Image (tube, rainbow, N blue to C red):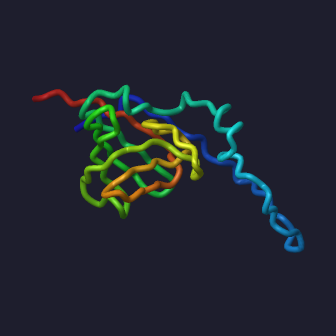
Amino acid sequence: MSAKSHVHRLPRPSTTSVKRRPEEPPEPDRVRVAASLDSWLSRDWSQGVHVETLEEFQQLQVCTQNTLYELIVINPCGEVRVRGGRYFPDWTAARFAGSTAGGSFLKRLAINLGLQMEFEIDRRRIVTSPVRTIAILQKSLPA
């Protein structure tokens, strides 16, 4: 059995929310903060894992807002085996593209807190809910 050796956690969001009055129209020109170029460029990228720096067959557990995913890195180019959620109920070969804020920006081959993981399988793109924790598992020694 593997033990967690390194864990990144996203702080819990505050429970404060802003509500607009029913008579206020929505703001169509408002750009999502996470998807703006300035926000993307100024983001703290230290709270993440770069797949290309991991050893082959390194195991990860990534907990998103909705699902716990298990990943095995096959090679540093993004080839992985993934299990978790409704799209990956069994171990599935996939290409891990990187992390996205849900727009057109992609942090290639990186898993970052607060962003969504993006996988490609059979020419289909699968995007997860936002990442909450990342655990790099220690490799178990043979008995």
Residue 61 to residue 122: above or below: above
- Taking depth in this image into account, of 100 and 132 the one nearest to the observer is 100
- Which residue is drawn at the image coordinates 17% and 27% (left, top)? 141
Quarter of the image with the C terminus in it: top left
Q: Would residue 46 be found to the left or right of residue 126 on screen?
A: right
Q: Residue furthest right?
A: 23
- Which residue is drawn at the image coordinates 51% and 49% (left, top)? 116
Q: Would residue 19 be found to the left or right of residue 99 on screen?
A: right
- Which residue is drawn at the image coordinates 46% and 36% (left, top)? 110
Q: Where residue 2 appears, x then y in whole percent?
A: 26, 36
Q: Quadrant of residue 30?
A: bottom right
Q: Where residue 131 appears, x then y in whole percent?
A: 50, 46
Q: Quadrant of residue 5?
A: top left
Q: Residue furthest front?
A: 123
- Which residue is drawn at the image coordinates 34% and 39% (left, top)? 78
Q: Where residue 28 appears, x then y in whole percent?
A: 78, 62
- Taking depth in this image into account, of 36 and 19 the one nearest to the observer is 36
